[in-house]
Amino acid sequence: MDIAEVARRAGLPASTLRFYEEKGLIASIGRRGLRRLFDSDVLPRLALIALGQRAGFSLEEIAGMFGADGRPAIDRVQLAAKADELDRTIRKLAAMRDGLRHAAVCPAPSHMECPTFRKMLRIAGAHRPQTAPAGRKQSGLKRIGR
């Protein structure tokens, strides 16, 4: 299949396929003119990459899930650790959801008078991301309020 066919079937732009090839996640088997050609086994490989990304694995981690022969060689301990991480994230998000739902219907005259909302504020303040020291560039994101 040429790159356009793979892109269409995988639902990805050709630029993503070229990027994945550059990172060693997929490999073309040749060219037809200027177009890269891929074996049909690239589609399940792309599906595994998509699944890994949705689960929160980095592209480097996903690349390590393939053996030298190109077939999946997924570390079960790594999968269990990621599942544990997802469980922690789910618990945090569920608690945040529940707190927001409560705040939306809380009978307190002001959110600042609601014990549940004030608890959410304390928790949020205690888990605030660290800011970069003065003069150091932050990760490309603007800080709110500046």
Image (cartoon, rainbow, N blue to C red):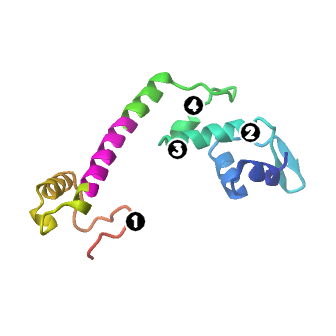
Percent position (x, y) of residue 83? 42, 32
The residue shown at (12%, 60%) is 114
Residue 141 location, quadrant: bottom left
- Separation of marks 1 and 4 at Cα, in angstroms: 30 Å
Q: Tag 4: Cα neighbours inside 10 Å, few (<14), some, or many (≥20)?
A: many
Q: Tag 2: Cα neighbours inside 10 Å, few (<14), some, or many (≥20)?
A: some
- The tag on residue 65 is 4
- Separation of marks 2 and 3 at Cα, in angstroms: 18 Å
On the question of residue 141 being in view, the answer is yes
Label located before the other in sequence (1 or 4): 4
On the question of residue 129 being in view, the answer is no
Label located before the other in sequence (1 or 3): 3
Observer-side mark, 1 or 2, equals: 2
Please determine whether, in this image, residue 64 is positioned above or below residue 9: above
- Separation of marks 1 and 3 at Cα, in angstroms: 23 Å
Nearest the camera: 112 or 23? 112
Q: Which amino acid type corresponds to the residue marked 2 in the rendered image?
A: Val
Please determine whether, in this image, residue 18 is positioned above or below residue 68: below
Observer-side mark, 4 or 3, equals: 3
| Numbered range of the magenta stretch | 86-101
Q: Which amino acid type corresponds to the residue marked 3 in the rendered image?
A: Arg
Q: Quadrant of the N terminus?
A: top right
Residue on which the image places disc 1: 140
Residue on which the image places disc 3: 54
The residue shown at (62%, 30%) is 66
Label pair 1/3, CB-CB below 8 angstroms = no
Q: Secondary structure at mark 4?
A: loop
Q: Is residue 134 left or right of residue 62?
A: left
